[in-house]
Image (cartoon, rainbow, N blue to C red):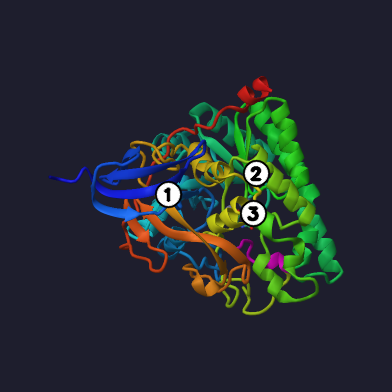
Amino acid sequence: MTAAFDLILRHCRVATASDVFEADIGIRDGRIASIGLALPPGHREIDVAGRVVTPGGVDAHCHLDQPMAPPVQMADNFETGTRSAACGGTTTVMPFAAQQRGSGLRAAVQDYHARSEGQAYVDYAFHLIVNDPTEAVLETELPALIREGYTSFKVYMTYEDQKLDDGQILDVLDISRRHGAMTMLHAENSDCIEWLTRRLEARGRTAPRYHAHARPMLVEREATHRAIALAELVDVPILIVHVSGREAVEQIRWARGQGLSIYAETCPQYLFLTAESLGMDECYEGAKCVCSPPPRDKANQEVIWNGLNDGLFNVFSSDHAPFRYDGMEGKHPEGEQVAFRHIPNGIPGIETRMPLLYSEGVLGGRISLEKFVELTATGPAKAYGLHPKKGSISIGADADLVIWDERELTLSNAMLHHAVDYTPYEGMKLKAWPGMTLSRGEVVWDGKAFTAPKGRGRFLRCGRPSLRPMRHLAEAA
Ligand code: URP
Ligand code: ZN
Ligand code: ZN
């Protein structure tokens, strides 16, 4: 008798974004073929023994092998980045094909395919970064790319070499509305940051800790409010990325109350780091936690936890920006300690995103298992048009699954699989780690070893975002 399934996971405690229940999961041709009790035999069987099984994570905001101005270089490419992702329970990554000023978007996409082709261990899709919205980009390239499955793009309100002015953002939002795409906004007021930075520098305040002084909550609040107003003007949903604290959350809550479809993302650094992580004194080690927006304080962490719990946030991403601490290509760009203005922004976290939230959120009693699934997998897949193929345990979905080991462990960089020489969470006590990760029905991480062949990861074309319009939420309230 031929087996009904290629693989069966027996005795799972299946967690989806809506339910937790006991079942076996039958997998055929890389997809979930059946979910039920006492399924017929599979060619291969794994007894999960009652452990929790969630959808593989969708990390919808990470940076891999993104071109940087020399000597700065990202430590992780598609090979090391997707390996690290898989070992932390993430089976789909969405990094950014970034347009260079003076060059087209199509060129950025082609370059990014060349960088990723044959390299990835798990599946991947691309967001775009629009840095130079010329007429050709807006009227020709972007609509064509959206039709081809690049349905989300990030725009920056800060960083001199990346920021768009309000008129340019309106132009991008208009394309997004006309073609059914999702615009992601990095909301910080660039001019305020530059003004504060110059004042700090004039006083000799250039240590990493002053990065947080140059980017106070106010600059994020103002830009968040402006981003919402621009989206309202065009009448289009937007997603505000890496929201760091109360004042930005309040803007988003207000917008939702008006019935506006403003979606939001936050990241582990706003739950587990504070401005003190940038160094209490003049110590340069704080460069390891320099990211934008910067981590805030304990009170703001609580606001972020509340937002995760009550539906304010749709997406929980790593914003993995992999720069080594040692060396010219990372946090010492001139071969030595530099003023905070010159420290590459961003911190690693692609492997720790899911275990941190599972340990402190689910097992710490702060969020439900269903909410964990929604934030780490289902929500991002819906936001970027990958659902239900990704982010879902349902018939026909890709068999991207994580079996969770609930055990005590101490996090150290030595156990991680990225190419960065540190983790900001060194020494943290965790309560869980993925005991097994499956991607399209294949075991890629068995809790001890990484077992997948390089290049097995496939490129994914995204559809339209399928998050519920916020208007419905407002009407229901
Ligand atoms: O500091 C950060 N977040 N760096 C990565 C780039 C970005 O803005 O997301
Ligand atoms: Zn950003
Ligand atoms: Zn980012």
Label located before the other in sequence (1 or 2): 1
Q: Secondary structure at mark 1?
A: helix
For the point 63% across and 71% down, the residue is: 427
How far across and down, in percent of the image, does residue 287 sit? 68, 70
What number is the disc on residue 308? 2
How far across and down, in percent of the image, does residue 476 sit? 65, 21
Front residue (pair 334, 295): 295
Q: Counting other residues with Cα less than 10 Å from the Cα at mark 3, is it few (<14), some (14-19), or many (20 or more)? A: few
Q: Which residues are magenta?
A: 340-347
Three-letter amino acid code at the position of disc 1: Val
What residue did someone put label 3 on? 364
- Among the 4 quarters of the image, the one containing residue 70: bottom right
**Location of residue 143 with respect to 409 vertically, above or below:** above
Label located before the other in sequence (3 or 1): 1
Q: Nearer the viewer, mark 3 or mark 2?
A: 3
The answer to whether residue 364 is left or right of residue 147 is right
Q: Secondary structure at mark 3?
A: loop
What residue did someone put label 1 on? 109
Query: Magenta region, mostly helix, strand or loop?
Result: loop
**Location of residue 246 with respect to 415 vertically, above or below:** above
Q: Nearer the viewer, mark 1 or mark 2?
A: 2
The answer to whether residue 113 is left or right of residue 88 is left
